[in-house]
Amino acid sequence: MSIKNYPRLPRLYFDLDGVLADLESGAKHHGLPPSEAKRKVGFYRDLPLVAHAQEAVHELRRDGWPTWALTKIPDSNPFSATEKLLWTRESFQAFNERIVITPDKGAVGTPDDWLIEDRPGHANAHAFAGYLVHFGSPDAPDWPTVVQFFRKVRAQGLSARDLKAEALANGTYLQYMPEEERSQRHYPFGLAPA
């Protein structure tokens, strides 16, 4: 295995479950609640795609964004790591070797990176160093909206670092943090929300 050298550009990290893979529909197809379905061996092999996910990844790559998949496996299903890896390679060839499987999403990325995540409170995603885009929220309800957001980011020269600092300062980023961390959080420039 050779050492990879990637250009240090801001990266887009895509969560899998609920962002690229339609976990809810997959669980429904198996007749199980998602919490049980994800424990089932083989579940991750045939998940349907979230609407417009493939097109969005393709468009964002075409716009020049380095794209990476970022996922956590359920503790109760160690086979899901292989299943998710195979599903991602088959559904999104663009990721190929750019797939990160980790129990802690807060340990991945830099302040200049972006994470598109549907469940900020899980897998320590709220501690991601860069800016978290909450997929499925009113600000990012679907893929066409997210693509437009990143085109606006590029057109206006915005950075993940600056947007996160602003969101921390005005308190809008706090919604992603567990309650006990909100009061202990360091705010840029000493600006804690009122």
Image (spheres, rainbow, N blue to C red):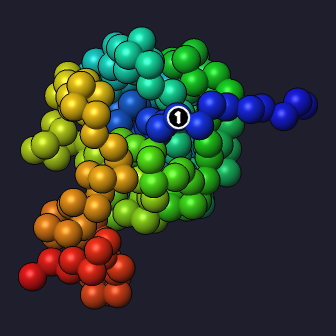
- Disc 1 is placed on an element classified as loop
The kind of residue on which mark 1 rests is Leu
Q: Is residue 89 above or below residue 38?
A: above
Height in image: 126 above or below 73? below
Q: Which residue is mark 1?
A: 9
Nearer the observer, 116 or 10: 10
Q: Nearer the viewer, residue 181 or 6?
A: 6
Which residue is pictured at 47% across the width and 38% down the height? Answer: 10
User: Is residue 166 left or right of 28 when viewed as pictured?
Assistant: left
Crowding around mark 1 (Cα neighbors within 10 Å: few <14, some 14 to 19, many 20+) is: few
Number of numbered discs: 1
Q: Quadrant of the N terminus?
A: top right
- Please state the horizontal and vertical placement of residue 125, each as a whole percent of the image: 42, 59
On the image, the x and y values in percent for residue 130 come to 41, 53
Q: Residue at x 63, y 31 (%)?
A: 7
Q: Quadrant of residue 28?
A: top left
Q: Nearer the viewer, residue 147 or 85?
A: 147
Q: Position of residue 91 (x, y in %)?
A: 51, 18
In the visual, does 100 lie left or right of 118? right
Is residue 160 visible in this depiction of the protein? yes
User: In this view, which residue lies farthest toward the right?
Assistant: 1
Residue 16 at least partly seen: no
**Quarter of the image that includes the C terminus:** bottom left
Name the residue located 46 percent from the left edge and 59 percent from the top edge.
Answer: 129
Q: Position of residue 44 (x, y in %)?
A: 53, 35
Horizontal placement of 52 versus 106: left or right?
left
Residue 81, picture quadrant: top right
Q: Residue at x 40, y 44 (%)?
A: 114
